[in-house]
Image (spheres, grey):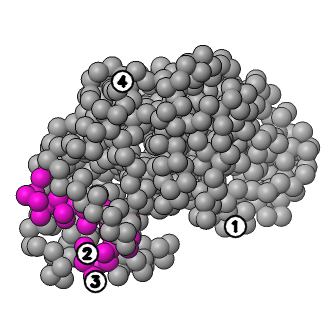
Amino acid sequence: MRLDAQSVKTSEWKEKGYFIPTFDTQKMIAETKANPQWVHFGAGNIFRAFQANLSQKMLEQGIEERGLTVVEGFDYEIIEKMYRPHDNLSILVTLKADGSVEKSVIESIAESCILDSENDAEFNRLKEIFTADSLQLATFTITEKGYSLVNAAGETLPAVKEDFANGPEKPKSYIGKVAALLYVRYKAGGRPIAMVSTDNCSHNGDKLYAAVSSFAREWVAGGKADAGFAAYIDDESKVSFPWSMIDKITPRPDESVNEILKKDGVEELEPVVTSKNTYVAPFVNAEESEYLVIEDKFPNGRPALDKVGVIFTDKETVDKVERMKVCTCLNPLHTALAVYGCILGYTKISDEMKDENLVRLVKNIGYVEGLPVVTDPGVISPQEFIDTVVNVRIPNVFMPDTPQRIATDTSQKLPIRFGETIKAYAASDKLDAKDLKFIPLVHAGWLRYLMGVDDEGKTFEQSSDPLLEKAKGFVAGIELGETDREKVKAKVLPLLQDEGIFGVDLEKVGLSDLVIDYFMELIGGAGAIRKTLRRYC
């Protein structure tokens, strides 16, 4: 059982329980190459598990006759060493919360391309695709960092600076190459297209627009592009940059899944680790839950993605869905589990959901404190979303996510994940921020986490965070067993007053004393964290 176009048509695959598409793959490939409709930038796991599967569902249901073209611009070896040797096929293993697995061969990718302006054959093929009248949309999963044109110090990246000066002929930067393809489309008659970021970041369409339009303006100003190019990018009837909200967990290929496929007789499962340290296997494993909400702004039409679960709506609703997820129904629960998971010695989020105290903590944060002020988008029920998070998604034993990974950059997450709820309470004429009990318990847990000592009194390595060293300074010198509350308050109060970290001044909203009280209990000695959680959860 080799993963290639010829082998998957043999009966053995179906006999082993794999879903094999029934549409005419060769006809789909020919039609897609002749009249491309959908291009996706970013050939990683989320694309293979989500966007490629959406395309396959449309093909299988007879809704669409064309698949998609995938483009990789960061790590060309993903295409060279994984996609093309397997005829652009992959195996999607859906890991269900009940312990079962669903195995599908994904055949919706008609063509895989490399975004390399130095390779004439590759780049010319992409130029052909971008001049096609049939092309309706380009989607992206290149991470939030992929849209940035500057480094951490705010300085323009060298490749971007070079591209600004040299124009669209042979750009070196990722977005420079994307902008060059749009310039080709502009030169071919100013044909319309939707540029759709599906990366997991707020207002992602604006980030993509800002990056692309920077190139257009620089090239026009420097005489490297026609004067009308910048206006083309700015004209939403020509080029749109819709917002989207995406939510699906696709962790690194798991060894247990590898073993399942190996027992089935699938060959050549060894992962490829590229020279850029990308870890890619012939299969991708993912949770069953998935959400994709997109602003319905497609100047050249779009595939019938609404028939396979994608929600199309207006920009304001996309924003509300994002706020619902990030501020109430998912991310705050993840951060609570991350903080307490680290100081209780857990290494899997799913194991924490077997801990009665932690389950009660996250349920109280979500249902009791969050839902009364949730941003209800209307297109997804917050109650149903959080039910799925608590009962299906986080407890899924197949999801090898760790509290240590989620604890990364906690100082950057607290203001959005908890601060917005506190603000909503403070602004309400029916609710009082002082009534919050469980969100402050997470804040106290984070102070305890900053000490770098677990519940047994052993030191542990904290996750990376740009403000970690600064924040640790506020708990430096506080030892387990400390009983002098005034001394502790004097040290930690300035941190609790930092609106940049908490989203609000916790003293002004009346919560700092409660956080300090909880913190005093958490530092009572070895075992004090568990004792405190039992008392309140």
Q: Where is residue 221 in the image (x, y as percent from the top left)?
A: 16, 79
Residue type, mark 2 in image? Glu
Q: Label 3 crowding class (10 Å Cα cut-off): few <14, some 14-19, many 20+?
A: some
Q: Determine whether, in the image, residue 394 is placed left or right of residue 216.
A: right
Which residue is denoted by mark 3 in the rendering? 165
Disc assigned to residue 43 = none
Q: Let me know if residue 499 appears in the view.
A: no
Q: Rounded to the nearest whole Å, what is the CA distance between mark 4 and mark 1? A: 56 Å
> Cβ–Cβ below 8 Å for labels 2 and 4?
no
Q: Nearer the viewer, residue 82 or 229?
A: 82
Q: In which quarter of the image is residue 252?
A: top right
In the displayed structure, 71 sits above or below 229; it is: above
- In what quadrant of the picture does the N terminus appear? top right
Residue type, mark 3 in image? Ala
Query: In the image, which residues are magenta?
Result: 163-191
Point 26% across, 28% down: residue:
64
Name the mark nearer the viewer: 4 or 1.
4
Q: Rounded to the nearest whole Å, what is the CA distance between mark 3 and mark 1? A: 39 Å
